[in-house]
Amino acid sequence: MAQISWLSNYLNNSRLSNWSSVKDQNPPTIYQVVILITLEIAGIAGNTLAIVMTVKMLRYKGNLPQVLILYLSLADLLTVLCSYTPSIIAQFILIPHSFFYPSHWLCQFQAFTMMTLLYYSSGMIVIMSIERLLAIKMPVWYKVNFKRKTVYIFMAITLICCVMFNLLPLFGVCQLSIHFNSTCFWDWDLTNPGTKLYSYTVVFLSIILVVAIFIINIITITIVKRKNKIADSQGRRPITESRATGVLVSTGFLFIISWLPFSVVILLHQTGNTKSMDPQQVELMDYVTFRLTCLNCCINCFVYGLINNEHRHRYLMLIKRPFRTCNNITTEEYESAFKPNAYKQSGQLSTRVQMFQATAIVLATSHTCIDKAANKYRHNKIYSTSE
């Protein structure tokens, strides 16, 4: 205990302790409790499902879109854990605020991990957009030069840049504070030069990412439509890259919707426009826009299944796996679902309604299992009684 106390005091008094204040916070409402818990459960379940699906697909034949989806899902899963879990623990499980943050470095750790993972997942979406554009625009050059090793190099560079940028608040560039719903973040209400410079840099980078993803996706969609139109006029099949392109383009536009309001709110704080607004409205605006950036990490995993029929079919197979005996699904059928082009060969219906039938399938199969167990028990009881 003495060593832990010494470490805590050392970190609090060191340069790494750049603490501003704890903002006055109202007690959480039942709606905030339900929203945070629901989003965390959905994000953990959906991203875990996406990770398992892509790992099984990579066992047979892996391509770059699947590798990128795997690492994006992993980053989104860690982001959900680092952004929602501390807020839920600090606010909704009756742990006192001072107990959860006994030292400033705990708040700094949450802010660093959460923002690093958020920026890393954003960089992953940019890499995915560029990869799709090269695959559609220059397919020959893409197959020869754009290997998995190239993707790993860009991912490593992105991670290093995110870590270096988010270490700046810990070394005195700007100050951290606990915002609404016990979320540790830099204090964007301060007017010191370091905080303003850091805030404007975040806004600039966010807008650059949003504009880059928007332009790249528009160019990709235009090229895909033009090539499909030419193929249709010549009686040929559409390009096969359009399925993966639809998933990644949808993910890119979802990122734009999630991050653009966040950048606008930071600009409003730095320009002083929020001072004339109602404090409760400002608090709600900060809460909604910040949670919207994290919402992107919870929804990406479901976009894969809603847009791509193959991913949806594999999601359903993973959901039905615990009940495969009741559904008469053999091990061979289950494993073959993750092989290349297995969805086309299986002749499954290509309707998006299947994704929303997952809950009904689980309930129905559970009921079937219970009926079979009850019938077996009844049969054994009758047989033992007759003897």
Image: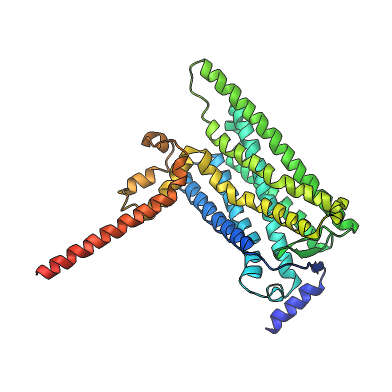
Identify whether 102 is placed above or below 145: below
Residue 268 at x, y percent in the picture: 83, 50
Q: Give the position of the N terminus as an image quadrant.
A: bottom right
Residue extending farthest to the front is 278
Identify whether 235 is placed above or below 246: above
Position of 133 with respect to 286 (left or right) is left
Name the residue: 39% across, 37% down.
Answer: 348
Judge by depth and name the residue closer to the eye, 18 or 275.
275
Residue 60 seen in the current view: no
Q: Give the position of the C terminus as an image quadrant.
A: bottom left
Residue 64 at x, y percent in the picture: 56, 40
Name which quarter of the figure residue 225 lies in.
Answer: top right
Residue 235 at x, y percent in the picture: 48, 17
Name which quarter of the figure residue 276 lies in.
Answer: bottom right
Residue 79 at x, y percent in the picture: 63, 56
Residue 379 seen in the current view: yes
Position of 75 with respect to 333 (left or right) is right
